[in-house]
Amino acid sequence: MLAIILGVSPLVLSAQHKPGPLRAGASMSNITPFLDNVLIGGFGSPVAKYIHDELYAKSLVLDNGSEQIAIVIADNCLIPREVYDEAREIIQKSTGIKKENVLMAATHTHSSVSAIKTGEQTGDFSYGKQLDEYQQFVARRIADGVQRAYYSREPAQIGWGSVNAPEHVFNRRWFMKPGTDMTNPFGVQDKVRMNPGVANPALDKPAGPTDPEVFFVSVQALDGRPIALLANYSLHYVGGVPGDHVSSDYFGVFGDYFKKLVGGDKAAPGFVAMMSNGTSGNVNNINFRGPAEKMGAYQKMQLVAKDVADKIFKQYSRIQYRTSVALGASFSELDLEVRKPTPAMLARAREVLANPDKIKLYHPLEPFYAQRLIRVQERWPEKVKAVMLALKIDDLAIASIPFETFAETGLEIKEKSPFKSTFTISLANGWYGYLPTPEHHELGGYETWLGTNYVEKMGSRKITDRLLEQLKAFK
């Protein structure tokens, strides 16, 4: 293993050797949560009463004889670093795969019990605390899944490509027409609004781009039997789920439908298709220019998932496969300062919570954010150590970020990467809130509010620079 120093944090770069024949394995490990716990995704506290579809941690292991990497995509909204770290330790002990070579990420379904901390709000910082029952379950099941994928390795071939699916992604942050009230929970006028309402006459223009490219990596046995497919799309989630249902959202629908496209259990026993979340912190599936859509529960996610899967499948037969590829992993920790409320903000928050019926609120969500401000002040450290992990598969690079990352950041990494092909997986190896760019911090809006965003305003810039350094170190 080769250590290179970047600033004050060591970068662990896997050793480079001449690759041998590729072997690969994949698996699905059930992580469906217990019922009667709080579901995450909105500002209410619905309790899980019904399992619409099972949730999974889907694993892919690649081994070229001298290096091994593993990728895990888990059907959960948010998973903190301590759960992933626990899984990493078990994986290394049980398989020998270096823990720095394991990329794990949540899909960000909004219809699951969070693995942040069962029954706690998402604004709590829990790194270093003992894992609760569901967190232990998720960590163990992730590790079991990687172990199963590892022991199912067989001679394989790998290829990749991309398609565009612009019709399903829309920037959800909007400039509004002059005169629109944009007061946020802290009494400040924002310049943009998140989810401003479909066909709202006050709409002006979107405040940012989208990334419509869908990347996919296909792994097959040497005889052409499909083993796994890893896709990546910068779409937050789709939704349309009853409030007390557990569901994997469109991520799970995509996997099930793609399995049917390649022949299901008859032609591809054990085939695993997984959809990872790209850089979608400011992107969702709502066309705010309208008209409003009227669909029943689960209908829209079926439409989106099947269309994206069909687009990929049209390119599936054109993939150029390789039976030997160079593999590598680059792991580092990046110190990021935590944003803290000012004394005036804390005083106001305590006043709001002490006199909720007597004080005139700036915004309907002010009591919610008052609670988050106090938790940030009392429970969050001065700095967090965010895992920066990148993987190399020949001339394909996969970057990963432990935040809900804006499309601009993913587009910049893709543009500046020294690799021929690059995509970014968000909500990976931990979770520390939203990651707006410095320019978006100037505009305000939900994703920038303290209690939604937790780290310094230059955080996205530092993360982009670090990941690009790691990608260049591969060369």
Image (tube, helix red, strand yellow):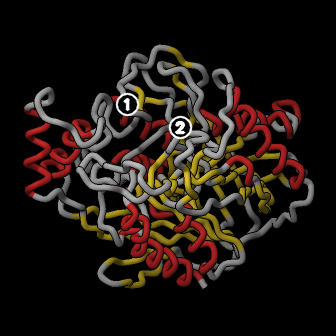
Q: What amino acid type is highlighted by mark number 2?
A: Thr
Front residue of 138/170: it is 170
Q: Is residue 430 visible?
A: no
Please rate how many residues cluster around mark 2, counting C-alpha atoms within 10 Å: few if below 14, some from 14 to 19, many from 20: many
Question: How many marks do you count on the picture?
Answer: 2
The image quarter containing residue 278 is bottom right
Q: In the rendered view, would you say 252 is above or below 175?
A: above
The residue that mark 2 highlights is 109
Mark closest to the chain's N terminus, 2 or 1: 2
Label for residue 134?
A: 1
Query: Which residue sits at x=26%, y=50%?
Result: 127
- Helix, strand or loop under label 1: helix
The image quarter containing residue 155 is bottom right
The image quarter containing residue 75 is top right
Q: What amino acid type is highlighted by mark number 1?
A: Tyr
Query: Which residue sits at x=77%, y=61%?
Result: 162
Please rate how many residues cluster around mark 1, counting C-alpha atoms within 10 Å: few if below 14, some from 14 to 19, many from 20: many
